[in-house]
Image (cartoon, helix red, strand yellow):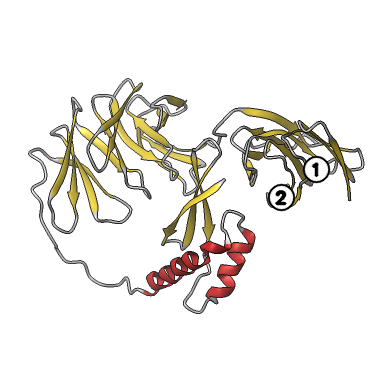
Amino acid sequence: MKLKRFLLRYYPPGIILEYELRDATREMKEIDLLHLTAESDIEVLVNQIVFEEPLISESRKPQLRRLIYKLIEKLEVNDNSDFYLFKILRAHILPLTNCAFNKSGDKFITGSYDRTCKVWDTQSGDELLTLEGHKNVVYAIAFNNPYGDKIITGSFDKTCKLWNADTGQLYHTYRGHSTEIVCLSFNPQGTVIATGSMDNTAKLWDVESGQELHTLLGHTAEIVSLNFDAQGDKIITGSFDHTVKVWDVRRHNDEILDVSFNSTGSKLVTASADGTSRIYNTMTGACQAILIGHEAEISKVTFNPQGSKVLTASSDKVARLWEVETGDCLQMLEGHTDEIFSCAFNYEGDTIITGSKDNTCRIWKC
């Protein structure tokens, strides 16, 4: 995995790490700084973050330090000022349905009954783009914040469309709903789109391929609002059936290569070609932890007999030992010269064996 860039989250304060997996897909990880104040010791905080976060190298310290100072400056700004009218834009020839900012606020978009979505410059009020192609009202619109380089539009024509926010190029048209689309949202990673419809369903779509990933069934009336949580793990949907539903949509980004239960069956762990493992509570189905650290696919995963640790074997030639409750990496077992395809604990949990494509197996004792 490789860190690509930092993103700021002002409220609540935090830093988002955008990183690239082996297959070139991108993921995001959030570092909460909920107790950050002007009195915080920045050097101590920076050193702690770099020590605890393997994605951040020493060379990134100056950039991390600047971002934390920027967060503190934002926290100190007085937000009690009155608003005043800045501009009035005659935006569309028919009534507007929706509006939304990009992350930086320098652009915003509007949807309308005139079947278009328009992109505007916030400061000048100039129209930058008109997105045309829908055959009915454009009702729901959104940027893929925090990136801001894509726009999604949902229409009464039963489709949603994905556009380039800078050029207006149409990437995909998503078809599958049987009636009007009235709400939509990107996940925070910008990889999945959720749409809600008057057909009582919500659908999940893959941004890159345009394929439908899943249909969320359960509401008995129109879904009129939906949103991802800050991590992109859950979706909340609101409906005319007088209910709100919360959906767990966590999943791996590649093939599942191995699964294992703990000794009581209360937890299971998965190993994936995306280089991560996930620990689930089998009673609730909730994902308890995502084990991030391997640089290639994980081929084998197992709990220790006590159920307190997880062992993973990977094509990156390393086996890792993890704490179940926290998801922290406790130890890296290094030395193999080729991919490790198997690993196991003995019955007492004090000995580990790893088998590799380098024609050796290694015995590890604690």
Which numbered tag is attached to residue 307?
1
Across and down, in percent, residue 253 comes to 54, 33
Closer-to-camera residue (335/182): 335
Across and down, in percent, residue 115 comes to 16, 32
Chain-order first, disc 1 or disc 2: 1
Q: Is residue 120 left or right of residue 28?
A: left
Q: Is residue 355 left or right of residue 224?
A: right
Q: Is residue 275 above or below residue 65?
A: above
Q: Quadrant of the N terminus?
A: top right
Q: Is residue 175 left or right of residue 246?
A: left
Which numbered tag is attached to residue 160?
none
Across and down, in percent, residue 278 comes to 65, 39
Q: Residues within 10 Å of mark 1 (few under 14, many from 20)?
A: many
User: Which of the 4 image quadrants contains residue 335?
Assistant: top right
Which three-letter amino acid code belongs to the residue tagged 1? Gly
Q: Is residue 322 above or below residue 337?
A: below
How far apart marks 1 and 2 lie (CA) works out to 10 Å
Which numbered tag is attached to residue 325?
2
